[in-house]
Image (cartoon, rainbow, N blue to C red):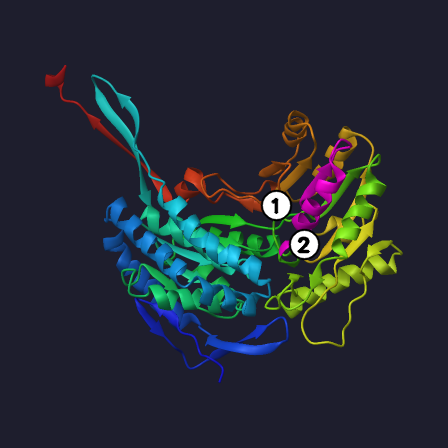
Amino acid sequence: MIEEYRNLINGKMIATNRWMDVVNPANEEIIGKVPSCGEEQLNEAVAAARQAFKSWSKTSIEERRDVLHAIADTIEASHDELFRLLTREQGKPHAQAEMEIGGAPANIRAQASLEFQDVINEDSQDRLSRTRRVPVGVVGGIVPWNFPVLMAIQKIAPALLSGCTIVLKPSPFTPLTTLKIAELIADRVPAGVLNIITGEDSLGPLITAHKDIDKVTFTGSTATGKKIMEGASKDLKRITLELGGNDASIVLPDADVKKVAEQLFWASFSNAGQICVAAKRIYIHEDIYDELSSAITAYAKEVKVGDGSEQGTGVGPIQNKKQFDRVCELIQDAKDNGYKFLLGGDVDPSGSGYYVPISILDNPPEDARIVAEEQFGPVMPLMKFSTEEEVIERANNTEYGLAGAIWTENPDKGVEIAEQLETGTVWVNEFLHLNPLAPFGGHKQSGFGVEYGMEGLKEFTYAQVITVKHDAARA
């Protein structure tokens, strides 16, 4: 029997009379049903959040931390059940699902450690002026399907810590683990403070347009982010948008080929390439291009593509049919244009599951779609470069600016180049590391605002300045 999951509204697990199927991308089997909510359920959730905000916004930081720690403890206690469910709905291998579920409590606790301090603007004989932070109100959170739990936590934790309440919408492709967490924590969070509702993509615009939602935080594509920004502008909602990226990795000629080959592989192919900050364009200096491209290809041949629940799987399926079709289209475009594949490039349409073979391209042109567009799949274009000036210009020649990486035995040189990249995050000799105490956000069309750290927490608040004029007697 297929399990039916409930939504969390006003502290209770609620069903509806309309349901959506959730599919395992490894075999295309239905593994669960979730409510398909519309305007009526959204209004209920927002009303609950609005009512709860009146008291939650007045709680102490210690009380809010206690709730966040309770959420973290609950996730930790249910680790095994949650990571297995995550693999079934998202497709990622068990080891990567364990990292996501295991990382969620640590992420919550790190963000819960933050705290605002009033800023004294003036303390003079005439007056005392200070700036304090006050919560925005009701937050609408829209979560993607590639890291459904971590991206949910990325929005829930700062919202609750700041004194906001939240209505969260998981992706219709991956709502199960989030709803299971909702069920586990329903009695550990005050009613209405955290509401989680599921629905089709049409639910997102309703959240953006809702008159009683004060802020929208969204992770997803740049195209959808622009629509959210447009919709939010009608009543000047606050927004945080973490959007697409076409992240470049630059490998300098002094890099250790054997060490870098494996690191670059996982920088590109972790989570089947479905990571906003994955290495999507690899620029390798011509002096080591042949050696490094051969080493990456050789390593890739050892990695198993398959069902994430099977032992030894390193790369799972694409999460959903729509994205699968898009990745296949990009691969077919590369083949139609005669670009050379060092590995992969042939998708078997006959089997079940959304599997794309690990595909590595040999020096396609800069204007190739496989280079110019965000692949979001297990496809890696390798390109040669000759000079630092050339590769910096090529890396920056994109509408995106989310992340990038430099690989070198000279960290100072790596930092020198990193400072010239037009991205929000740059790693030197590392990849995919995000610190919840450091701000994360994109430049250009990769985002608006930031998440994480004090800068991210501030985005859930207004600044309020209180000035007290001293009476003449004090003088």
Question: Callout 2: few (<14), some (14-19), or many (20+) C-alpha neighbours within 10 Å?
Answer: many
- Seen at 66% across and 66% down, the residue is 317
Q: Which residues are magenta?
A: 246-270
Whichever of labels 1 and 2 marks the residue nearer the N terminus, that label is 2
Q: Nearer the viewer, residue 121 or 381?
A: 381
Circle 2 sits on which residue?
269
Q: Residue 290: horizontal and vertical position, in percent? A: 85, 42
The residue identified by callout 1 is 445
Instruction: Please tell me whether residue 362 is drawn above or below residue 306 in the rendered image.
Output: above
Comparing labels 1 and 2, the label whose residue is closer to the camera:
2
Q: Give x and y (percent) for residue 8.
A: 36, 68
Q: Is residue 466 above or below residue 2?
A: above
Amino acid type, label 1: Gln
> Marks 1 and 2, how far apart in space?
23 Å
Res 146 visible: no
Which image quadrant: the C terminus?
A: top left
Question: Residue 166 appears at what percent x and percent y?
Answer: 37, 57
Q: Nearer the viewer, residue 12 or 43?
A: 12
Circle 1 packing at 10 Å, graded few (<14), some (14-19), many (20+), is many
Asked whether residue 287 is drawn in magenta, I would say: no
Quadrant of res 311: bottom right
Amino acid at dot 2 = Phe
| Nearer-the-camera pick, 365 or 202 | 365
Q: Residue furthest front?
A: 311
Query: In the image, is 309 to the left or to the right of 64?
Result: right
Secondary structure under badge 1?
helix
* Residue 249 % position (x, y): 70, 41
Residue that lies at the very extreme toward the top in this rendered image: 475
266 drawn magenta: yes
